[in-house]
């Protein structure tokens, strides 16, 4: 009888560590584990591989997708100013790429199932499975944590019983996800929205009160909406994003503490560190204000909001996203220029911007310019708000 193989999306965290043994104990699968490198720390790739091999997986794969993530996902998110309820979508943005890589591997090795460690309350089950079902509809999806209805406490106890080392305990059960575009922290005491996030939760950003005492100016250069240089240094995509993270992080910029609306409808308290993302998107939006027309900006804000919503819900493969890309890409053909941002102890302010494609005309807007005859505006002003004026007249009767 041919053995059943499950390809497990493996991060080395509590959920997927439990899945390593649950797939064998409860489902009778042999496991192939895979980690997709989307910019997490090197140790977050080495440790899972060592742990997976220790617990008897058939094989472990590490797939390098950093460059693809930066160019085909992060840069698209920048061009669309992708913010969901005010924060950059780091975790959500990486999930479709991870799901695609895992689905491709599952097909390659002839797996019977694809497995992940998502719970039944979170967003990632939607993000992973929507893509996996689209790419490999013939392969079964197994989600042990969700399907066995396990609590965090039960998972920790199971891991201890099986001798699985896990990076959390009952006193500090934080769930952390990290990639090139940001870092999320949730769970444990953070589930109480009145609890201030402990300092030890943060890794990319210094406390604003501890940041350097001098202001730092950062110049971001864009070509067709894509960042290509920081402070005059042309950088490859991955290096540029890491540089942005470093600069903004040391100035205490990029911490987000929000109560967000999950796909299921649950409200969830989340903490994010996304210094580079906040820096680059803020600079990009400032350039758009200089270059795009008022009508383009108004319409693009609606497009940007919908774009972020699709990412959040795991609908990267939705045809509408491709349709929106067509509009966004057209607007970005003129998005060439430089933006200067001033960082200081957690604050970020645009202090300069220039573009050869700017609609802004310094000469025309100047108070000293006489070519635009001010007297010609009188008629236009007289009829501005005409309907509101008629309404006011009716209400006075």
Image (cartoon, helix red, strand yellow):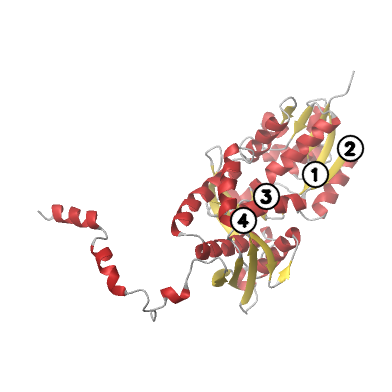
Q: Which label was assigned to residue 201?
A: none
Q: Label 2 belongs to which residue?
A: 59
- Residue 397 is left or right of residue 137, and the answer is left
What separation in Å lies between label 3 and label 1 (alpha carbons)?
18 Å
Q: Which label was assigned to residue 73?
A: 3
Q: Please report whichever mark, 4 or 1, sits nearer to the chain's N-terminal start.
A: 1
Residue at screen point 80% across, 31% down = 107
What separation in Å lies between label 2 and label 3 (alpha carbons)?
28 Å
- Mark 1: few, some, or many residues within 10 Å (few <14, many ≥20)? many
Q: Position of residue 172 (x, y in %)?
A: 69, 51
- Residue 41 is left or right of residue 392, and the answer is right
Q: Secondary structure at mark 4?
A: helix
Q: Nearer the viewer, mark 4 or mark 2?
A: 4
Residue at screen point 25% across, 69% down = 378
Q: Position of residue 41 (x, y in %)?
A: 78, 56
Q: Are marks 1 and 2 in contact (CB under 8 Å)?
A: no
Q: Position of residue 125 (x, y in %)?
A: 65, 36
Q: Which label was assigned to residue 35?
A: 1
């Amino acid at each position: 009888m041919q053995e059943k193989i499950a390809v497990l999306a493996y991060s080395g965290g509590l959920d997927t560590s439990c899945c390593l043994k649950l797939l064998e104990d409860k489902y009778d699968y042999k496991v192939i584990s895979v980690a997709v490198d989307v910019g997490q720390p090197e140790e977050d790739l080495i440790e899972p591989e060592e742990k997976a091999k220790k617990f008897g997986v058939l094989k472990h794969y590490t797939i390098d997708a950093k460059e693809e993530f930066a160019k085909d996902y992060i840069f698209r998110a920048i061009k669309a100013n992708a913010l969901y309820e005010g924060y950059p979508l780091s975790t959500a943005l990486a999930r479709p790429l991870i799901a695609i890589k895992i689905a491709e591997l599952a097909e390659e090795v002839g797996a019977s199932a694809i497995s992940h460690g998502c719970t039944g309350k979170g967003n990632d089950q939607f993000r992973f499975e929507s893509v996996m079902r689209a790419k490999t509809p013939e392969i079964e999806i197994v989600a042990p944590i969700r399907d066995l209805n396990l609590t965090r406490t039960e998972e920790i106890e199971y891991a201890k019983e099986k001798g699985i080392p896990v990076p959390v305990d009952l006193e500090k059960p934080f769930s952390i996800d990290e990639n090139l575009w940001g870092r999320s922290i949730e769970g444990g005491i953070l589930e109480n929205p009145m609890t201030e996030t402990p300092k030890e939760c943060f890794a990319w950003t210094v406390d604003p009160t501890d940041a350097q005492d001098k202001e730092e100016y950062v110049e971001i250069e864009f070509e067709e909406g894509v960042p290509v240089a920081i402070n005059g240094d042309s950088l490859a995509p991955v290096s540029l994003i890491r540089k942005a993270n470093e600069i903004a992080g040391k100035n205490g910029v990029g911490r987000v503490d929000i109560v967000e609306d999950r796909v299921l409808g649950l409200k969830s308290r989340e903490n994010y560190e996304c210094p580079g993302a906040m820096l680059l998107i803020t600079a990009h939006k400032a350039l758009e204000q200089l270059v795009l027309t008022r009508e383009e900006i108004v319409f693009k804000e609606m497009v940007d909001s919908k774009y972020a919503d699709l990412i959040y819900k795991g609908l990267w493969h939705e045809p509408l996203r491709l349709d929106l890309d067509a509009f966004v890409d057209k607007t970005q053909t003129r998005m060439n220029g430089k933006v200067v941002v001033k960082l200081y102890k957690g604050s970020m302010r645009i202090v300069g911007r220039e573009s050869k494609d700017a609609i802004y005309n310094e000469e025309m807007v100047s108070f000293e310019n006489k070519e635009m005859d001010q007297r010609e505006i009188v008629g236009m002003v007289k009829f501005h708000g005409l309907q509101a004026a008629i309404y006011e007249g009716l209400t006075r009767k």
